Amino acid sequence: AGKHVIRLKIGDPFVFGRGGEEILTFRKFGVNSVVVPGVSAAFSAPLLGNIPVTHRGVSNQVVMCTGYGREGTSPDLIQYHKEQTVVFLMAVGRLRELCDRLVR
């Protein structure tokens, strides 16, 4: 009693992360938790490269997708739209395939 446990994660643990699962597990054991939000890489990585995820007259939508579906499968992709920015997270090993599928 009286001790604190810190689970430090980068970015937003509730975007394609296990943050929700961990909170539910803590609750199951009667442990209260506090989440201190971070900035998702979906927004911070493009920002570091001076790449806007939206831009007036060019892109008016942002869609975030994971690079891997359940059990390592390739995720279903939405239909390409020219006024849309698609951000893939955790997708380095599959990026070329995902981009090819988007423009088919």
Image (cartoon, grey):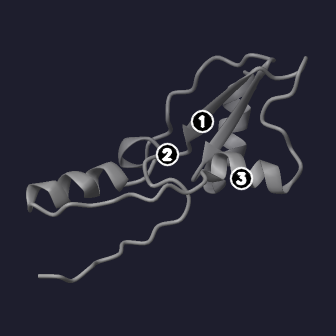
Residues packed near mark 2 inside 10 Å, few (<14), some (14 to 19) or many (20 plus)? some
Where is mark 1, residue-wise? 64
Q: Earlier in the sequence, mark 3 or mark 1?
A: 3
Q: Where on the picture, by quarter, is residue 57?
A: top right
If the image is split into quadrants, where does the N terminus sit? bottom left
Give the foreground label among 2 and 3: 3
Query: Disc 1 vs disc 2: Cβ atoms closer than 8 Å?
Result: no
Dot 3 crowding, Cα within 10 Å, few <14, some 14–19, many 20+ = some
Which label sits in the foreground, 3 or 1?
A: 3
The residue that appears at 84% across and 39% down in the rendered structure is 52
Circles 3 and 1, Cβ within 8 Å, touching? The answer is no
Q: Which residue is mark 2?
A: 68
In the displayed structure, 27 sits above or below 68; it is below
* Callout 2 secondary element: loop
Query: Up-down: is 9 above or below 101?
Result: below
**Discs 1/2, front:** 1
Q: Residue at x 65, y 38 (%)?
A: 98
Q: Could you give the CA–CA distance between mark 2 and mark 3, rounded to whole angstroms? A: 21 Å
Tell me the CA gap for discs 1 and 2: 12 Å
Left or right: where 53 falls relative to 34: right
Q: Secondary structure at mark 3?
A: helix
Residue 69 x/y as whole percent: 44, 41
Residue closer to the observer: 39 or 100: 39
